Amino acid sequence: MFVHVTKARYTRDYKVWLAFNDGMEDEIDLSSELHGEVFESLRDKAFFQSFALEGHTLSWRNGADFAPEFLRELLA
């Protein structure tokens, strides 16, 4: 089964609540994952909150995204 993010909601700081197609759901903290050139913009909380659910994962208009498998592993 391929892992997909089915729902996402900003909660606070650099945290989002996610639901996956396997039934798992919970809040994750991405604050320690915002390193590297493409993720620098996400340190601005207003920009971080502007994510969209595209291609079965979180993405931002600057091209940043996280693999859904990676996000799912953060819940394990």
Image (spheres, rainbow, N blue to C red):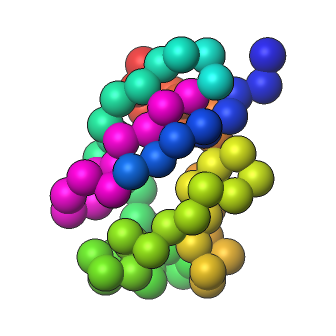
59 in relation to 63, above or below: above
Q: Position of residue 61 (x, y in %)?
A: 61, 80
> For this view, does 13 lie left or right of residue 57?
left
Q: Quadrant of the N terminus?
A: top right
Residue 54: image quadrant is bottom right
Front residue (pair 17, 28): 17
Q: Main secondary structure of the magenta part?
A: strand
Q: Quadrant of the C terminus?
A: top left
Q: Residue at the far left: name it.
A: 12
The span picked out in magenta is 10-20
Q: Is residue 64 magenta?
A: no
76 in relation to 58, above or below: above
Residue 47 visible at all: yes
Q: Is residue 12 magenta?
A: yes
Residue at image position (57%, 72%) is 60
Front residue (pair 34, 16): 16
Residue at image position (60%, 38%) is 5
Q: Position of residue 46 (x, y in %)?
A: 31, 81
